[in-house]
Structure formats: C-alpha cells, structure tokens
Amino acid sequence: MSRLALSILVFSSISTALAQADPSVSTALADKRFKYPDGIPYQVDTDIGDRGPQQGYNKCNSTTEGPTSMCQTAMVNSIDDFCLWAPAKPNSIIADTEGEEVAWCTKPGRGTRIIPPNALTGVQFMRTPDYLQVVGYIDQTLINLEKDDSGGELDPHGADLRGNPLGGIVFSNGFPSNGGNNNTYQQVIEWHNFMGGGAFCIKACDPAGADAANFCQHVYDRIGCEYNAPNNAQDNVFESCQGDDQDFPGIYTQGGQVMTYKQPPESLGDIESMPYQPRVPASSNCQTYSSNDLYTAAATGTASGSGATPAPGGDGGNNPKSGAAVTRTGAGSSPSHTSNAAHRYIPRGASIASVVGAMALLV
Ligand SMILES: *[C@@H]1O[C@H](CO)[C@@H](O)[C@H](O)[C@H]1NC(C)=O
Ligand SMILES: *[C@@H]1O[C@H](CO)[C@@H](O)[C@H](O)[C@H]1NC(C)=O
C-alpha cells in the first residue's frame, strides 16, 4: 500500500471518530472573529481536543519571521502578496500534517516563512465580485512538501471544527468590500487551499458576500483545484486578472438542469470519472508580470510594497522562464463560456484520474 493510501485510511478513521463532535472544542474556528493586527491573540485555538493543541501561533512579528516561523496567520492580497499553507518540516505530506501547516508568504513583513522566489513557476491571481483566487505551479519541495505528494485541502472547518491547520486564520486587504483601501485587513471567514501535485490554489471569499460559504465550499476535498477553483493558470505565466464568479463548487448545469455533485466516500475507492467539467469563468484586464518583479525583490526585502511593475505582453527579458508557454489551446472546454476558457487545471505529470483520485482528505 502506498504511503498516501495509508495516510488516507488513517485519516478516515480519525475523521469518523471526530465526527461525533469533540466536547472539548468550545467554539468553531469559523465562528471566531479577530481584528488585524491588534486583536489577534497568541493562539486563536486554546482547545486541546482529540487532536492536541494548536502547533503554532497567530501573533506574528519580525521576531517570528523566517525559516523556523510557526506563524499560522496568512494573507491573500494580490499576485505579489499572498500566503499558502505548507508543512513546518521538510519532506512532509499534507495528509500527515494538515492540522499543523504554517503560513508561507511571498512577502516579508508578516512574521511568516517566505516562499523562496524560485519556487513559484506560474501564478494567476483573479479578483472577482465575491472572492480572490490564486492558482499556480510550485516546486513544492521548497516549501517542505514531499516531491510526489498529491496533497489535499486546507480550510477553516474539519470534522472537529478546529480547522486545518488548527487555528489557521486568513486576512485580506483586497476585497471589493475593502473599497480599494489597502491599509485595512478584513478577516477571511471562508477560504480553501489545495496544495500538492506541484500546484496550488487558494481562494479567499469576501466576507461581505452573501455566498462566501458556497464559493469557498469545503466538502469537495477530493476533486482538487480544477473543480474547486476553475482557472486557466499556466506554468511560466504570471498574471493578475479580473474575473467573473465561478459556479459554486459542485454545482453544474446539464441539459438546462442545475445539478449538485455528490462526492463519493473514500471507502468506494478512487474517483475515476466525473459527470461534469466545471465552467471556467470569463476573465479580463490581465496584467502579465515577470517572476523577478513579483517575488525576488519582495523576498529580499527591497520591494517598495506597492506592488510590481506590469510588463504587458511579456516579461521584459528578466526571467528566462517567463512567457515561454503562453499558448492557450481550446482543449476540453466550450469557447462560449469565456474568452480564454480553455485551460483545464491539471498539475504537471498527473492524469486527471490520478489527480481526482489522489486529492484525498478532509472536509
Ligand atoms: C512576537 O510574536 C511572538 C509569538 O507570537 C510573541 O511571543 C512575542 O511577544 C511578539 N513580540 C512582540 C514584540 O510583540
Ligand atoms: C493596493 O494594492 C494593489 C495591489 O498591490 C495595487 O495595485 C494598488 O495600487 C494599491 N492601492 C493603493 C491605493 O495603494
């Protein structure tokens, strides 16, 4: 039995046990509210529960910043300013560490670990009426994931309602409801982050939106970024766009009927096929950047903080990788859906069946 399969089994049994509500957990993580930065306690989760204490902390500052940070307060602001959840120790897999992930961010100044600039090889940032979404390709070994880990989902729920990671919280200054005020950070109540297979997606839903919990749905943990965060991100391309809202994950229209996909339990084996292809929403006003502009300066602390310089249509020659793979094929998607609807999100080197089947993990 592969290690991944084993951990899924282990997890399933834990998950079943926890489903009988953990009496020692006083307040669900998704019900906790904090003001950034002064209202954040050392740890937002003081329960012990069946999964033990929160592994890191939420009060993060210049002292905690760097390669040993255990900061569990993340940000999703813009293409050059976002964080992902990943393990604290090298060569880990998400299935074993989901309760313990720490924040890895593109920018210093948040008391977190910093994603090494060369780790991100393609990123698409999308601002829509209801959420911010970042999807991309990453050398996941540089953020402590085992090379072959196909990963899983992190979100503020989980069977015991303590979140994965326990006590992990997210803030943003980038929502439509922020009205362009970059100095105000709102707590992101509903978010989800899929990590693994050399790729990632993180979606932060605007708390002012009526459907935040639907757009950031957390029950489709086995079907990955393609179904939870439909996108046309491409490796070697760094772009920031505006987009329309997606359909709620798991909701699709077939023959004029609105259908709800029901994810089968892991006990029934791998998910070999899906009854639908998610609609990739239309996008516009994409600005293309070079990786250097976005991440290298930021990580070394020389960024102005106001964002990167757009390099429309190219990379300005700064990055040998950038711009190398801009072809958008029409494969797999109806052109009537969107202006650039084509690309289905399949992590490199993985077949759709294996991605779907391997995206194990929790609600
Ligand atoms: C920095 O954060 C750590 C960890 O939360 C905390 O123990 C420490 O008191 C903080 N330092 C300051 C100056 O706030
Ligand atoms: C806010 O941040 C965005 C993204 O970095 C940037 O494009 C914009 O210019 C900023 N707005 C202000 C008022 O600083």
Image (tube, grey):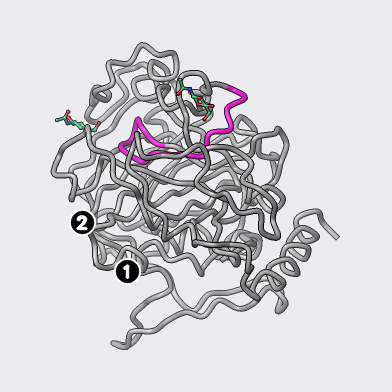
* Comes first in the chain, label 2 or label 1: 2
Quarter of the C terminus within the rendering: bottom right
Q: From the image, tell me which residue sits under label 2.
A: 129
140 to 5, vertically: above or below: above
323 to 285, vertically: above or below: above
Q: On the picture, is 211 further left or further right than 72? A: left
**Mark 1 CB within 8 Å of ligand 2:** no
Instruction: Work out how far the residue at label 2 is from the one at label 1, CA to CA, in angstroms.
Output: 13 Å
Q: From the image, tell me which residue sits under label 1.
A: 247
Q: Position of residue 70 (x, y in %)?
A: 58, 32
Q: Position of residue 348 (x, y in %)?
A: 57, 46
* Crowdedness near tag 2: few (<14), some (14–19) or many (≥20) residues, C-alpha within 10 Å: some
Residue at coordinates 33% horizontally, 55% vertically from top-left?
A: 205
Q: Nearer the viewer, residue 180 or 309?
A: 180
141 to 27, vertically: above or below: above
Q: Position of residue 25 (x, y in %)?
A: 58, 62
**Of tags 2 and 1, which is closer to the observer?**
2
Q: On the picture, is 130 further left or further right than 332? A: left
Residue 212: quarter of image: bottom left
Label 2 is placed on what type of residue? Answer: Pro
Q: Position of residue 128 (x, y in %)?
A: 24, 53
Describe the element under mark 2 as helix, strand or loop: loop
Quarter of the N terminus within the rendering: bottom right
Q: On the picture, is 205 further left or further right than 46? A: left
* Crowdedness near tag 1: few (<14), some (14–19) or many (≥20) residues, C-alpha within 10 Å: some
Residue 230: quarter of image: bottom left
Residue at coordinates 69% horizontally, 52% vertically from top-left?
A: 52
In the image, the segment drawn in magenta is 67-82
Q: Is 277 one of the magenta-colored residues?
A: no
